[in-house]
Image (tube, helix red, strand yellow):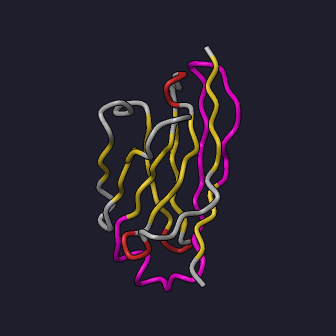
Amino acid sequence: QVRLMESGGGSVQAGGSLRLSCKTSGIILSAFSGNSMSWYRQPPGKQRELVATIEKSGATNYADSVKGRFAMSRDNAKRTVYLQMNALKPEDTGVYYCSHPSYRHLWGQGTEVTVSS
């Protein structure tokens, strides 16, 4: 059974930092390392939006709103991806989810990030 387990969220003041983790289970190593992974977020009352993607090569892409502040990384051996979030803004508030392209229908419980001004 494939599972995506996000953690690391919390409440911080603007300008603070958080590091999110997404540990996967039930995905064989080749299926994890051979695919991209993404982080999404859902702000309160809004649609879920793509935040960052990391390719199997390690190359990363970011939404314009987080470029220069967020950094996504991966540890294939641990089947885990991370999202380092710096210089957080109130508009970064939301529930953060990770996603695997072969399991787009699956969402974890997410991890909540609240940034206060």
In the rendered image, which quarter is residue 58 located in?
A: bottom left
Q: Residue at x 47, y 83 (%)?
A: 29
Front residue of this view, candidates 35 and 48: 48
Judged from this view, the residue extending furthest toward the front is: 45
Q: Is residue 18 magenta?
A: yes
In the picture shown, does residue 61 fall above or below 100? above
Mark count:
0
The answer to whether 43 appears left or right of 47 in the picture is: right
In the picture shown, does residue 14 fall above or below 95? above
Task: Point out residue 60 in the picture as x, y percentages from the top left corner.
Answer: 31, 51
Q: Assign the C terminus to one quadrant of the image.
A: top right
Q: Residue at x 41, y 82 (%)?
A: 31
Task: Point out residue 115 in the picture as x, y percentages from the top left corner.
Answer: 61, 25
In the picture shown, does residue 46 fall above or below 55? above
Task: Point out residue 9 in the picture as x, y percentages from the top left corner.
Answer: 66, 42
Judged from this view, the residue extending furthest toward the right is: 11
Q: Residue at x 45, y 70 (%)?
A: 105
Front residue of this view, candidates 102 and 84: 102
Q: Assign the N terminus to one quadrant of the image.
A: bottom right
Q: Residue at x 61, y 37 (%)?
A: 18
Task: Point out residue 98 in the picture as x, y percentages from the top left corner.
Answer: 50, 58
Front residue of this view, candidates 102 and 80: 102
Front residue of this view, candidates 111 and 24: 111
The answer to whether 101 appears left or right of 88 in the picture is: left
In the rendered image, which quarter is residue 14 located in?
A: top right
Q: Is residue 13 magenta?
A: yes
> What segment carries the magenta color?
7-36
In the picture shown, does residue 96 fall above or below 93? below
